[in-house]
Image: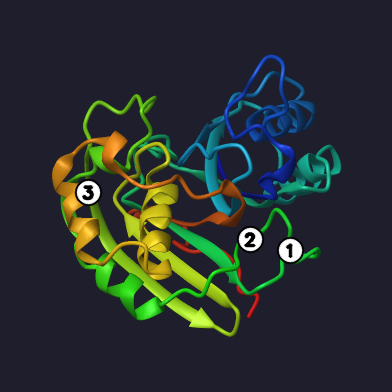
Amino acid sequence: MRIACAVEYDGSGFFGWQRQNHARSVQGDVEAALSKVADHEVRVVCAGRTDSGVHASWQIIHFDSQVERSERSWVLGTNANLPNDVGLLWAREVDDDFHARFSAQARRYRYVILNREVASALLHGRTTWVHQALDVSRMQEGTRYLLGEHDFSSFRALACQAKSPLRTIYRLDIKRSGTFLYLDVEANAFLHHMVRNIAGVLLAVGRGVQNSQWVEDILDKRDRTQGGVTAPASGLYLVGVSYPEKYGIEPLGVVPEFG
């Protein structure tokens, strides 16, 4: 059987999603817990690997198993063997042709910025703090250059291993709610550090360090060394993954909102 699950986690205590030999990873914890329930070694595939410190409210995974377990047993049994900062939300049997990564049609992230003079002790590690005043209208103006299909070489990490820098952004919005700013971005797929690099560029525009036209200039250069600073991981959440309707998987999980 092929089983799909939704996983949520606080990325603060992990060195990213991907399994590592000498560091704690979300994948490592989830596979160890699932293996106890299955009574055999389980390997999982995820919709999108997240970096160290990045959170998720709707990471979709799949794994294969020949043992008979109810959907409830997969969830409760796995969560009983997981630490408090990661958990399964649901589990269900899916068609054998389902693939958490390759069947996905779009991914959605939210980047949360706390914009006030002092940092938050309560939201440390869960938001990105910016003390300078940010002009949301300037930032929103800059987003329009990134919509659609582009070569995002200027917004990918130098170590990015993706074969092609072409990605299509379907949605890119910024809104303010009190002292919080929310950057929502949805695309067919993302390059390594792509969302954090977009956030870093837009923050420079919001501070008034650069004008909105600078976003287009960076995009056209197709050179990461000409781009802005990579924004911190702490404010980034994977909140949605879209699949064909036949799989019956909801496209969006909990979207964090603090304001």
- Please name the amino acid that badge 3 sits on: Ile
Q: Label 1, on which residue?
A: 123
- Measuring 21% from the left and 31% from the top, which residue is drawn there? 164
Q: CA distance from mark 3 to mark 2?
A: 26 Å
Q: Secondary structure at mark 1?
A: loop
Q: CA distance from mark 3 to mark 1?
A: 32 Å
Q: Mark 1, residues whose alpha carbon is within 10 Å: few (<14), some, or many (≥20)?
A: some
Q: Which mark is residue 166?
A: none
- Please name the amino acid that badge 1 sits on: Leu
The answer to whether marks 3 and 1 mark residues whose Cβ atoms lie closer than 8 Å is no
Q: Label 2, on which residue?
A: 127
Task: Work out whether residue 130 can be spotted.
Answer: yes
The answer to whether marks 1 and 2 mark residues whose Cβ atoms lie closer than 8 Å is yes
Which label sits in the foreground, 3 or 2? 3
Residue 197 location (% of width, % of height): 39, 47
Q: Label 3, on which residue?
A: 218
Task: Work out whether residue 2 can be spotted.
Answer: no
Q: Quadrant of residue 70?
A: top right
Q: Is residue 250 left or right of residue 68?
A: left
Q: Mark 2, residues whose alpha carbon is within 10 Å: few (<14), some, or many (≥20)?
A: many
Which label sits in the foreground, 3 or 1? 3
Residue 238 location (% of width, % of height): 52, 53
- For the residue pair 39 and 224, the one nearer the viewer reads as 224
Q: Secondary structure at mark 3?
A: helix
Q: Is residue 132 left or right of residue 222?
A: right
